[in-house]
Amino acid sequence: KTLTMFKVAALYNFVHIENLCEVRENVRHLCEENEVTGALIFAKEGINGTIAAEEMKLTVCIDKLVEWSLVNPLEIKFSWSSKLPFYRMRITIKDEIVTLGVPNISPSNITHTKKVSASDWNKLLSDENTIVIDTRNDYEVKIGTFQNAVNPNTKSFREFPTFVENNLDTIGDKNIAIFCTGGIRCEKAAAYLESKGIYNVYNLQGGILKYLEEIPPKDSLWNGECFVFDQRISVVHGLQQGSCQLCRSCRTPLTPIERESPHYVEGISCSYCYNHLTEDKLKSAQERCLQIKLAEQRNEKHLGYVHPSHQVHKI
């Protein structure tokens, strides 16, 4: 029997969208017609998200999004999954497609930041005059990041401006190399840095996903795995699925070593949340775990479980 593979598209585009509700309904209908699942965010500043489907159906959907001028085909990152990485299609409207929380910060205002291709990224990182900053959140950084990268220790992207404010003096005249999963947070981060008078900024074009797609392991400065906002949880070089799994109680991505902890119980708890579980939460987790296993035995989807790519993790 031939294994059905699903194509995954990570996409974003800063483009002005006026009729948000109308666009949302048009895209929802398009996705339903083509059995496309995933999570998309719309705002007046653009579109952001990840969608997946069988290859031909996803192609139809992407072609229409390009025709509607919602996405740039050259900026889409494609990968593959042996399982459909989303349970459903979720489309939301927000104030920002990636929430920085600072008014009037737009990538359209960027004048100095340079985009660096994956093939040139290693050279930049090897320069002693370069400070490398991971603009992602702590739960992402802990499973993988670039060699010598600074971890801002943020819980959400809203905290990035505070990190910058607290470290302006240490940045000085250094080259600032910033990166994120697919590129969108770096666009906002670069615009914010420029608003603070920092112009020697370099942005990894296409993000970690493009780097892992193009750079072979033997030449790589990447350590670990890259968290993704779907049921694959993480990817590695070649955009193959990684080894991380999700704690279904606190939704923290866990490495194989972390899953060896005596506090890890599949579907119930991990070392990050075991001492925060009340009796009610524990019973709820046990019931959820049971229902998920029963659904799997029936070869059904357990839709009561809302994956972090839909609403839990903040980016």
Image (spheres, grey):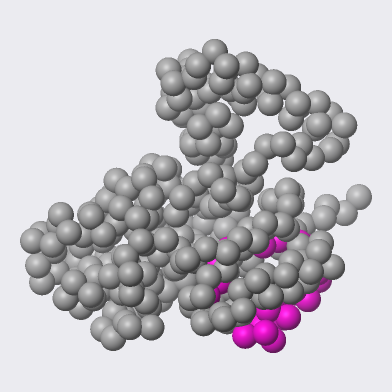
Residue at position x 44%, y 21% from top? Answer: 276
Residue 179: image x %, image y %? 36, 63
Residue lying furthest top in this view?
279
Foreground pick, 2 / 288: 288
Q: 49 or 278, which lies in front?
A: 278
Q: Which span is picked out in magenta?
A: 46-69
Query: Is 54 left or right of 311, judged from the image as shown?
Result: right
Residue located at (51% from left, 82% from top):
16
User: From where the camera sits, is residue 212 visible?
Assistant: yes
Check the image and report above or below for 268 versus 315: above
Q: Quadrant of the C terminus?
A: bottom left
User: Residue 275, how many percent across, how many down?
Assistant: 43, 17
Residue 78: quarter of image: bottom right
Examine the structure image and report whether residue 17 is included in the region drawn in magenta: no
Taking the image as shown, residue 28 lies to the left or right of residue 123, namely right
The image position of residue 96, as x and y in percent, is 46, 66
Nearest to the observer: residue 282 or residue 289 = 282
Q: How many numbered markers are drawn?
A: 0
Residue drawn 82% across the image and 55% down it: 4
Q: Is residue 68 magenta?
A: yes
Residue 310, position in %: x, y?
60, 50
Q: Is residue 147 visible?
A: no
Q: Relative to 222, say whether 299 is above or below.
A: above
**Residue at (56% x, 59% y) in the render:** 238
Side of 175 relative to 278 (left or right): left
The quadrant where residue 287 appears: top right
Residue 165 placement, left or right of 209: left
